[in-house]
Image (cartoon, rainbow, N blue to C red):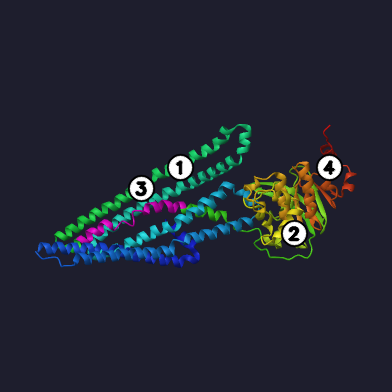
């Protein structure tokens, strides 16, 4: 528990001063909470004595007492309000900071990071983990630290009144603390399992919802739902295990405190009967005995939730990478955009497995030229493009842009020079305007419309219900494949980067859309350095150079005219494409 408390305090960083001020007001609140009880006990004790001696109660005493008690209660709530003003907003500000930091961190890591961390783990950490910190972090630390501070205030008062009774109180707290430690250990052990189960549940839910179109098309709802059902059952099982483990320890914790209260009252009664305590002090101590543990009783929940918070912080720290891919990078302005691959090697490392994907690849793509890359599926074409965009770092050799090694750039500096158009386009759940302006947020209306017209998408956008302000579905689900592709090209045109990477941008389009997109791509690539992965002959034939990749190696290099006359993979590819593209309906 204390380790988690220290971690939360360390997490507060620059906000620690506010946290400590909150603790100070918790201490004052504890005193204010005890004040009306002490005063009431003292007055009641005196009234009983006066009555026993046949004396009258001073006039105005009840009104005076009511005023004092009301004032102290009001003062306590004022202290609690001030404490909340200092403490309550800390977690919201910190979590907002951490969400942005994690978003920035994920943008600066290698794509290999996402092969090591699955979607369920990342989503669970960003959502559940940060949500737990946001809503529980400050509350639990206040319950724990503030609870013991309040108890400490009353304990001091009890010790002044009746030391023996105060020591009984301390024994009760120590027994309670042992139970809290048992709760913490049990929760820590099971919280790890619960987190894994929640990650499985998140993965199963995401997979089930994303795969519903396939599920429905095959009529296999039952089979697809089984993984989700199993994940739900496991989540229920571990939640019940934690709850049933928590209950007995919590009961022992409360039993220790309640028993201590009873023994304290017996002790003070004995002291009163033996005349070691005056009657007013007997009443004061008795009332305090009933309330001294009020701030400690909720701490059992804190002991459990602190384990959850500790586990959440572990996962968030694990999510934040130790080394960014561009940790030593600088912002570099380029005067030329020649691309050089020099004996580039790359392999995927996953655990103890190592798979070579690119082996000894060297080529030059001069500024303003088009380089086409072709090859069988899995030969390494897309990996070459990802290495150029520095989604991964090379395992050997080097890649330069404008004479600078890619490792000299920051990710933002490098990618400001590159626009990418993928086969599988992702559009954000936002307006058409926001999706087009994604690469240039400050673009004017005229610039955006000009880019849309060049990308051959202005007409269909204007036919949408609200034109450029139409909100499209997540991933662009409300648009056709060709429409999404043209919007992504408009986005790239607007960014106007000097280097263009096209990853099979027309591979799966119908003839009508392909014609429009080829026109859009022509507008996009004029005067640019272009790297294109393509299977369409119209795209490949006009390239300044063609690289034929097979099994991670460049097996042929040259223009279309040079390669088509050579025996090899390219000539076979051309014959296959001619057969595929030469069909007609009779």
Q: Answer few, some or many: residues within 10 Å of disc 3's Cα (few below 14, many 20 plus, some between 14 and 19).
A: many
Establish if 149 lies above or below 454: below
- Disc 1 marks which residue? 238
Q: Residue 568's x, y, as percent?
A: 86, 42
Q: CA distance from mark 1 to mark 4?
A: 56 Å
Q: Can residue 325 be seen here?
A: yes
Identify the secondary structure beneath mark 2: loop
Count of numbered tags = 4
Identify the residue position indicated by label 3 in the image: 249
Is residue 351 or residue 19 the one in the foreground? 19
Q: In the figure, residue 59 lies in which quadrant?
A: bottom left
Dot placed on the residue nearer the N-terminal end, 3 or 2: 3
Residue named by callout 4: 569
Sooner in the amino-acid sequence: mark 1 or mark 4 = 1
Over which residues does the magenta segment extend? 283-308
**Which residue is at a point 84% across and 51% down the rendered structure image?**
543
Q: Does residue 411 appear to the left or right of 11 in the view shown?
A: right
Q: Secondary structure at mark 4?
A: helix
Q: Residues within 10 Å of mark 2 (few under 14, many from 20)?
A: many
Q: Which mark is residue 496?
A: 2
Is residue 374 magenta-colored? no
Judge from the rendering whether residue 572 lies leftward or rightward of residue 469; answer left or right: right
Of the two numbered discs 3 and 1 in the rendering, the one whose residue sits closer to the viewer: 1
């Amino acid at each position: 528990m204390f380790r988690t408390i220290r971690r939360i305090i360390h997490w507060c960083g620059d906000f620690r001063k506010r946290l400590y001020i909150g603790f100070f007001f918790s201490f004052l609140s504890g005193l204010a909470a005890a004040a009306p009880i002490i005063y009431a006990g003292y007055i009641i004790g005196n009234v009983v004595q006066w009555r026993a001696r046949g004396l009258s109660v001073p006039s105005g005493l009840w009104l005076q007492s009511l005023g004092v008690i009301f004032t102290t209660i009001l003062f306590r709530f004022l202290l609690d309000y001030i404490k909340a003003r200092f403490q309550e907003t800390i977690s919201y500000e910190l979590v907002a900071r951490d969400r942005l930091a994690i978003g920035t961190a994920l943008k600066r890591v290698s794509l290999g990071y996402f092969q090591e961390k699955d979607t369920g783990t990342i989503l669970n950490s960003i959502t559940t983990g940060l949500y737990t910190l946001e809503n529980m972090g400050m509350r639990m630390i206040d319950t724990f630290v503030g609870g013991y501070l309040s108890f400490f205030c009353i304990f001091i008062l009890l010790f002044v009144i009746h030391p023996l009774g105060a020591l009984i109180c301390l024994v009760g707290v120590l027994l309670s603390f042992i139970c809290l430690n048992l709760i913490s250990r049990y929760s820590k052990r099971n919280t790890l399992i619960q987190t894994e189960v929640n990650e499985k549940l998140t993965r199963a839910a995401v997979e089930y919802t994303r795969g519903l179109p396939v599920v429905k098309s095959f009529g296999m709802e039952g089979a697809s739902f089984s993984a989700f059902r199993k994940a739900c059952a496991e989540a229920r099982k571990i939640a019940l295990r934690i709850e049933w483990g928590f209950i007995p320890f919590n009961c022992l914790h409360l039993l220790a405190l309640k028993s201590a209260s009873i023994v304290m009252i017996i002790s003070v009664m004995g002291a009163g009967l033996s005349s070691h305590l005056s009657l007013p002090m007997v009443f004061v101590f008795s009332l305090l005995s009933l309330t001294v543990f009020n701030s400690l009783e909720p701490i059992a929940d804190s002991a459990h939730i602190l384990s959850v918070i500790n586990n959440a912080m572990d996962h968030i720290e694990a999510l934040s990478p130790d080394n960014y891919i561009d940790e030593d990078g600088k912002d570099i302005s380029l005067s030329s955009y020649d691309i050089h691959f020099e004996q580039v090697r790359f392999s995927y490392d996953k655990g103890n497995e190592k798979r070579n994907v690119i082996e000894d690849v060297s080529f030059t793509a001069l500024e303003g030229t088009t380089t086409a890359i072709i090859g069988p599926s899995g030969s390494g074409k897309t990996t070459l493009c990802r290495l150029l965009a520095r989604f991964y770092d090379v395992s050997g050799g080097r890649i330069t842009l404008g004479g600078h090694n890619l490792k000299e750039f920051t990710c933002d500096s490098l990618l400001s020079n590159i626009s990418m158009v993928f086969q599988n386009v992702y559009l954000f759940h936002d307006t058409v305007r926001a999706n087009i302006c994604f690469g240039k947020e400050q673009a004017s209306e005229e610039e955006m419309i000009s880019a849309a017209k060049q990308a051959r998408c202005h007409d269909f956008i204007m036919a949408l219900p609200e034109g450029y302000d139409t909100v499209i579905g997540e991933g662009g689900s409300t648009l056709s494949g060709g429409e999404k592709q043209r919007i992504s090209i408009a986005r790239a045109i607007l960014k106007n980067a000097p280097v263009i990477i096209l990853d099979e941008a027309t591979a799966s389009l119908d003839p009508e859309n392909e014609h429009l997109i080829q026109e859009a791509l022509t507008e996009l690539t004029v005067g640019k350095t272009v790297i294109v992965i393509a299977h369409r002959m119209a795209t490949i034939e006009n390239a300044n150079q063609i690289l034929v990749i097979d099994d991670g190696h460049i097996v042929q290099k040259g223009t279309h005219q040079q390669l088509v006359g050579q025996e090899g993979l390219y000539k076979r590819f051309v014959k296959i494409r001619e057969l595929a593209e030469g069909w007609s309906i009779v």
